Amino acid sequence: MTIPAQVGGRVRSWMNRPEMRGVFWIWAAMTAVLVVFSLYVPARLMGPPASPTMHAVENTMTVFTVAASPVAAAVWSVALYSLLAWRHRGSGQPETDGPPIRGNTPVTALWLVLSSLLCVFLLIWGLAAMQSVTAAAAGRVPLQVNVVGQQWLWSFSYPGQGDIETDQLYLPIDQPVVFHVTSKDVVHSFWVVQMGIKIDANPGETTVTNVTPNKLGTFVVRCAELCGLLHADMEAAVHVVSADDFAAWARGRRSPPVESSPPK
Amino acid sequence: MTAVIPAGPARHVEDLDAVGRRWRLGVVLFIFADAAFVASLVFTYFYLRGLNTDSGWFPDGAASTPIWIGWTIAAGTVLSAAAYRWGHSGIRAGKEERLVLGAGLAVLVVLVVVVGQLIQLATFPFGVADSSYGSTTYVLGAANMFHLLITLFVGLGIVNRGRLHKFSSTNNWQVQIIGLWWTWVAAAAVLSAFTTSFVASPNLLVGNG
Amino acid sequence: MSEAMVEFAAAPPSTGGGGLLRRLNLLTAVAGGVLFAAIGWYISHRIMQLGDFGSDRVVTITLICWALGFMVGIGAFAGPLRWLLGRDQEHEDEMFLAGKDQGIGRYFRFTTDHKVVGIQYLVVTMVLFAVGGTLAMTIRTNLITPNSGFLGPQTYNAVVGIHGLVMIIATIVMVTGPFGNFIMPIMIGARDMAFPRLNALSLWLLVAAVPILLSAAFLGGIPTGWTGYAPLADQAPPGMDAYTMTIIVFAMSSAIAGVNITTTALTMRARGMTWSRTPIFVYGVVASVGLAIPAFPMFMSAEVLLGMDRSFGAQFYVAAGGGSPWLYTNLFWLMGHPEVYVIVLPAVIALMEITPVFTRKPLFGFNVAVLSIVGIVGLSVMVWAHHMFTTGWAPDLNGSFMLTTELISIPTGLLFLVIIGTIWRGRVWTTLPMMAVYAMLWNFIIGGVTGIYLSDVPADYALHGSMFVTAHFHYTLMGAGLTGAIGALFYWFPKMTGRMINKRAGLVSFWLVQIGFNVTFMGMFAVGLAGQPRRVVHYDHLFAVGNFVSTMGAYCIGVGMLILLYAVVSSWRHGAVAPANPWGAKTLEWAVPNPIPLENFEVLPVVISDPYGYGEGDPVLPPTQRELVPVGAPRDPVAEDDTETSQS
Ligand SMILES: [Cu+2]
Ligand SMILES: [Cu+2]
């Protein structure tokens, strides 16, 4: 017999053992449930994305949960099957010991290889996602918005638009935006929740993040770093509007006598 | 998993070598912990110097402490460690007087260095609140002071115990482990002097970013 | 307590030795601490001219004086002074220090016996959990509805910070303190720790730190969360000075404990206990405290610098003077990530030690387990900046920290393999400790997988600072860590107290805590994904359902923990007397009789195999460990019966 055939034979006879079948079916059922959970729950909970970045994050959550499902199911199915099949019933100590299995090199090697592959996959996925976030911003001239955090409010200014200052963020749809973020006092964290971006506002430093909003509507900026008494209230509205509405709003803000009014 | 030795070692009588080995490992681990502390202060110095936030590391017109003071303190500490080693090699050869003399000399040198370190801390040409350079230099000096005071205590102990004939050519592990500590204190003083030799920030961009 | 106090106030035992320490105990320590603190307060408040930073300096000096006075009052400085003066301890002094013939009073003294220290650690840990748990209930009560108004923002922030720090300290010591001190030396066949006096020193430093920590509640709280991020910490009330002093004292305590435990495990193992015959729990303890040795001094330096910022106006973290908040985050997380493994490793590995006993099988892949512990320890010092992806300190390094972080999943996965490999085809004996193993398998998988999301840089940009993170680390530190510690307590309770724990109460508490835990933190995952930030006193109506569910789960945990407390206290006092080896385990601690004699072993054991020879018929050894019971020591009849049946 050739070596592959031997291995194949061993695997087959192994799979025919009742406990392996039991574990397999439990594992398959758990994996199926977990995959369904992965496909529907995490991304749902995060809500509809308002930017490609957030879309990518929700994808990542789904894919990672799917990828983790068979692993989690493997651990849990072995534990559960052992409990169902070999549980010692009775009050005292088991009369007999279990089989003296001190290890199993093929199983350990397989586990190591699979978990390493999974790890490599996670890493490549993450690096690719990081790359795509930076690549998305390249090419077009972004709209710059300066963000200043202070206890306990956000203020925004648009240096390319005649230094408009505002406490609510207005962004044109499908236009790359770059945020230059800093703080006047303690560390805050600038978090545009539905767009999946976050960067700390540090006193004395300017940090940068960017995003391209792709959904009309009103969203929210929250502070994600505990910053003192009214940390919970440190929110601001984000209005994503059409390019025309944005231009109109900016014009309105630039001419001092006209009071700003949010566009429809 | 076990068997029993019918006539095990009598209680409380422990092999001196075993006790010495154990304490040596203990002191090495303590030095490791202290080294992590010192390393984080050195990291603080170089990190803040490199960042130079708001050009505030070493503001224009600020004064720095002359670097020779730090190096003199380090040299004194090295000298005391060397004197101590000389005393230790004495007791290994069974010469008690040389231990007392060497360790006593080392303690005296440390005492001088303590005074020098105190003078330096008291006469820095800047305040602890003036700049991050000032703050970090102060804390490095204070850490050195802390080292020296501990060294003074254990050094005095060795002198006194040497005087009381507690050590011999075969029983001197206490002298040895304190020598390890002493050597580390000297190394840390040198590291501290080296660190504070670099004053101006390499990052001179105004308001970086 | 009253009973203890009576005995404790009784005349000192008639045996000689002890010297001055004979007169010192917890009462004199508290008196010394209060006296010194009063003097420190008076001098700093009335006499010194303190200027701008007055209140911070007064608080800091007072707290330092408290700690010094407490340590003087407990007698911590007696040993070093005697050494200096050349008046070494006689055998009788050592026996007194070890607590010989002192009854319950030895638990209130500077006692060096590792078993006494282990029990002291256990009690301190339980007190800390009681405080931290009460605060957790307060937090969850406040968050029951979006705007409950139960706590104002100031109180809420203060409570969140104190809860965090109390729990972090409690979880750091919960395994290596009680079990690392009590069990580990017996497990390796030693008569005590390598440095018994340092052992007492580390315990009493921890005890001295607890009132400092609690004093924060009266000094404006810790309004920064347990992380104490600067420069928010620079502007916080004097409670923050209590925070820095707590950490400085606690860091000393854990560095000393770390040195002591590591040296013990490395140099005091019984003859024949080679590394491949050393129980895996010893590896877990050493990994934990070994990581703590370099980690906590960095934490200490971060807090020394913070204290200087606050009391002297130093410029470490304040941007205006050339400082940087990134310095704090770096120093903090250089400690902070290893600290996660300081907490989780010994707990999970205690369960790994338990699994072979309750499946009656050898540990599956001992070498694999050791290698993965080494791998986790090695990697854990290279991942700290995954907590700082969003700080902007070095965006170009985010990718490499993602790499090192995700690599940890490989050795961690192997730990799971070892445990399920051991369970596989075992005689699964569902005692309370074994149930903890199962609970950990469930919780730690969830904690680990959610950790992978957070290691992914883009996903972390979305999730960082949200309730998702809070839920994630509670799944690891509580779901795996605390569950492991409770499993270890169930497992070693008969050896530590000489009594069996009330199984029915234990069961009720187990299910309440585990179900409540999963409900609480599943709810928290949901609101975190939906965008609720951490550490907020009120929140959007969007998150109302998840938070309500969380709070209900938390109450469930609270009730379960109270029942656990009842089970521990009542079983300790009047539980059934435990046989020497109720579980038929093969590690050495089960080979000593109950109660354990002062120096554990009359005759030191020699080890000829590892402790996992289940089903292998123990080829060389006689079937019972009876031989190890010292001649003349009282024999426990139940123990004999039990060991008879245990080895078939
Ligand atoms: Cu904020
Ligand atoms: Cu971490």
Image (cartoon, coloured by chain):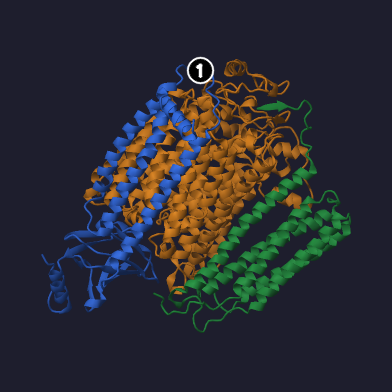
Who is closer to the viewer here, A102 or C598? A102
Q: Quadrant of the C terminus of chain C?
A: top right
The answer to whether residue B77 is left or right of residue C374 is right
| Residue closer to the observer: C187 or A101 | A101
Q: Which chain is orange?
A: C
Q: Residue at x 42, y 48 (%)?
A: A119
Crowding near pointer 1: few (<14 within 10 Å), some, many (20+)? Answer: some
Chain to which the residue tagged by mark 1 belongs: A
Whether residue C9 is visible, yes or no, is no
Q: Position of residue C380 (x, y in %)?
A: 51, 51
Q: Is residue B178 left or right of residue B99?
A: left
Residue C507 percent across, percent down from the top left: 42, 26
- Disc 1 marks a residue whose amino acid type is Gly
Which of the 4 image quadrants contains residue C599?
A: top right
Extreme residue in the front direction: A1
Can you tell which chain is drawn green? B
* Residue placed under numbered mark 1 in the picture: A92
The colour applied to the residues of chain A in this rendering is: blue
Residue at the image position 71 percent from the left and 30 percent from the top: C606
Looking at the image, which residue is at 34% across and 29% down?
A: A25
Q: Left or right: where does residue B160 sit relative to residue C261? A: right
Task: Indicate left or right for A93 with A44 as reference.
Answer: right
